[in-house]
Amino acid sequence: MKLTVLFGDITKLHVEAIVNAANNSLLGGGGVDGAIHRAAGPQLLEECKRLGGCQTGKAKITKAYRLPAKYIIHTVGPIYQDGKHHEAQLLASCYRESIRLANEYLIKSLAFPCISTGVYGYPKEEACNIAWNTVNHIISEEISILEEIIFVCFEQKSYRLYQSLLS
């Protein structure tokens, strides 16, 4: 299993699946969610309308349409309140559920954005640690066909945090 940290645009990656930090409706929004919907094209919205939304901490999968990836795994991260409303468990569940779907669809390369750290307000350092620890636990304790997981950061602070975890 190869773990990589990249600074850049997740919509440009040539991987089998990218993860979308979606909202509960799955119908697009701001940040990475909006960027993915714009890059994938209107067919993504049409497919998402048929999914009936998604609960926080869960994940659903669609085709990627105009993106270089084959699939998009949509997961809904928690809106950070104060850390006392199961936010950490829900965020960890986003990573577990996304990897579960990747295994179910026989996906070997998967790219994650920084889930919940934008408008959902999750503190970046804590969110990066949860993501890193959850993914490392899964790949060390469970059987997975994944060969590569990439953490894609669109801003420098998260990139530096992941780089320090990688080293």
Image: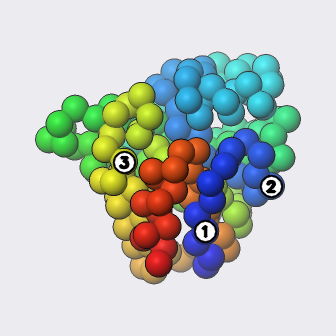
**Residue 118 percent across, percent down from the top left:** 44, 34
The tag earlier along the polypeptide, 2 or 3, is 2
Q: Please give the label number shown on residue 14.
A: 2
Left or right of 148? Residue 53 is left
Is 137 left or right of 145, judged from the image as shown?
left
Q: Tell me, yes or no, if residue 68 can be seen here.
A: yes
- Marks 1 and 3, how far apart at CA: 18 Å
In the displayed structure image, the side of residue 3 where residue 109 appears, left or right:
right
| Amino acid at circle 3 | Lys
- State the residue position of label 1: 4
Q: Nearer the viewer, residue 8 or 21?
A: 8
Judge left or right: residue 128 versus residue 32.
left
| Marks 2 and 1, how far apart at CA | 14 Å
Q: Is residue 57 above or below residue 14?
A: above
| x 85%, y 35%: residue | 66
The quadrant of the rendering that contains the N terminus is bottom right
Mark identifier at residue 27: none
| Local secondary structure at mark 1 | strand
Q: Provide the residue designation for mark 3.
A: 124
Quick one: SS at disc 3? helix
Residue at 33% x, 54% y is 125
Label 2, secondary structure: give it.
loop
Image: 118 above or below 91: above
Q: Earlier in the sequence, mark 1 or mark 3?
A: 1
